[in-house]
Amino acid sequence: MTTLSNLIQSEIADFFAGFGGPGEPDIQSGEAQRQLTERVLDLLRKEREAAVPVGVVRHIDVGVADRKGIHVSLYQQLPAGTEVFAAPPAPPVAVPVRYMNRYTGACYTLEQQPDAASDQMVYVPLYDVAQPVAVPDDYFSALVSKARPAAEKAMRKFPQPNYVLLKVAEEAGEVVQAGVHYADKRMSWEQVEGEIVQLLAMLIRLVTEGDQINGVTPPENTRAAAPQQETNQ
């Protein structure tokens, strides 16, 4: 597993190394996501093909109805106490089939809305099958990490003076609405999570730059400790 993880990390690093150059895939259109998915799937396929079986399991008749004995034959001698694992099939990598505008509810394909995959402040990815949720050990910190890029993007796209306080209230209302819809089974938890991330993004913006329209300026020491905007474009 470590070898496979290293291969995937190397493949991703190699894929993004040339970004920004002529002829490289366009990240806004979703072409970059498609190509990276294909490369990772190819790695997983090669890993499965390279796996070497250690034995075979056979069911044998033991003379009892509805019961079978199990006989395991090993292709080579293994040390006593060796555990043998059955490798599960690699799960398919899901690709969103539509992107929903969180404000209007309208759904689009990437052909109809090329920036939907990258504009997480506006669009929520939709899948045709339920997606398993891998929960990190520190779930809240992971949500904050997701919110930081959204906050930085909002500060660049909608600079001060800006009604940040009103945006905090608006996003908080979106979280409440999403929670109600989730309870009614009208939204997935991933969609609720998306609204939480957007609320956190606005809170990050509030403690970073305040709200110059309403005269809210965070103390200098809190602004110095907040994540800074990137100045190199």
Image (tube, rainbow, N blue to C red):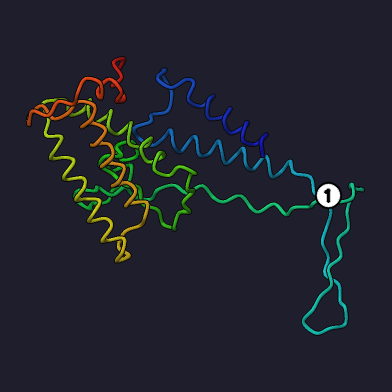
Q: Residue at x 28, y 49 (%)?
A: 100
Residue 105: percent from the left, percent from the top?
22, 53
Nearer to us in this view, 126 or 148 = 148
Residue 59 x %, y %: 82, 69
Give the left or right position of residue 47, taking residue 114 as reference: right
Up-down relation of residue 23 to residue 96 (above or below): above
Total numbered labels placed on residues in the image = 1
Residue 119: which quarter of the image?
top left
- Along the line of sight, which residue is nearer the eye, 54 or 219? 219
Measured as percent of width and height from the top left, residue 38 is found at 53, 39
Front-most of residues 22 and 80: 80
Seen in the picture, residue 13 relative to 194 is either above or below; the reply is: above
Specify the farthest residue to the top.
232
Q: Quadrant of residue 56?
A: bottom right
Q: Which residue occupies 31% across, 25% down? A: 227
Q: In the picture provided, is 93 more to the left or to the right than 90?
A: left
* Local secondary structure at mark 1: loop
Q: Nearer the viewer, residue 130 or 85?
A: 85
x then y, percent, for residue 112 = 28, 43
Please indicate whether residue 180 sits to the left or right of residue 70 in the image. Answer: left
In the drawing, does residue 23 fall left or right of residue 69?
left
Image quarter of the N terminus: top right
Q: Residues within 10 Å of mark 1 (few under 14, many from 20)?
A: few
Residue at horizontal 27 percent and vertical 29 percent from the top: 153
Residue at the limit of the structure toward the bottom, as seen here? 65
User: Considering the image in quadrants, where does the C terminus appear?
Assistant: top left
The kind of residue tagged 1 is Thr
Q: What residue is disc 1 on?
A: 82
Residue at the location (85% across, 51% down)? Answer: 81
Q: Quadrant of the rendered structure where residue 188 is? A: bottom left
